[in-house]
Image (cartoon, grey):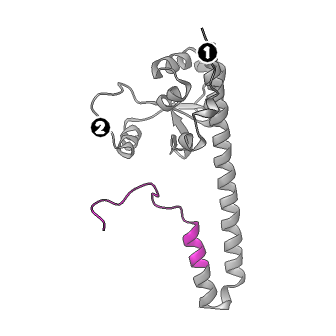
Amino acid sequence: MPKSRTISVNTYISHESIERKIYLIRGVKIMLDSDLAGLYEVDTKILNKAVRRNLDRFPGDFMFQLTESEFENLRFQFGTSSWGGRRYTPQAFTEQGIAMLSSVLNSKKAIGANILIIRTFTRLREFLITHKDLQRKIDDLEKKYEDQGQQIQSIFEAIRMLLEPPVNPNKRPMGFHA
């Protein structure tokens, strides 16, 4: 009988797939309990049960429950119906709460997925810092060369347009196009 191979979490979870599961709610980047449970390969019910048994590890800045309106807003973004599904609004975990989950869920898969999630949060933070630095430098240059005329102003406008994130690069146009 052949030995079972353990597959590293890194081989099937990408940073991009994790980034798509990070939402900004109440001005904080969070991940939902159901998304985390999927990454850890446990039922959402099991994850929430483990958290409830260790509530003292999850203060309000580590985890909070979404309100009905926040959940409806997310449901609208997902494009899912309100039929079936959850009985309760989901739990939202901040980066610190996700780090704390590794002490509550002690499986190898959970620990590996947790490491990848924390690295993704770090990558996002570094990207935002770099983006803000670049924005500040452009603003400084714009002020310095403000009196140089319309030509430089149009260059700055073109650069700003390039810095804007694409509206939705994966979205295909609707309808028939020849």
Q: Position of residue 102 (x, y in %)?
A: 65, 24
Q: Position of residue 61 (x, y in %)?
A: 60, 34
Q: Is residue 34 left or right of residue 76?
A: right
Three-letter amino acid code at the position of disc 1: Ser
Q: Is residue 75 left or right of residue 3?
A: left
Q: Is residue 156 above or below residue 169?
A: below
Q: Nearer the viewer, residue 128 or 52?
A: 128
- Mark 1: which secondary structure? loop
Q: Quadrant of the C terminus?
A: bottom left
Residue range of the region highlighted in magenta in the rendering: 156-178
Q: Is residue 158 magenta?
A: yes
Q: Is residue 166 magenta?
A: yes
Q: Which residue is mark 2?
A: 81
Residue at screen point 60% across, 25% down: 58
Q: Position of residue 96 (x, y in %)?
A: 65, 33
Residue at screen point 65% across, 24% down: 111
Q: Which residue is mark 1?
A: 4
Frontmost of labels 1 and 2 is 1
Q: Is residue 47 above or below residue 23?
A: above
Residue at screen point 41% across, 35% down: 67
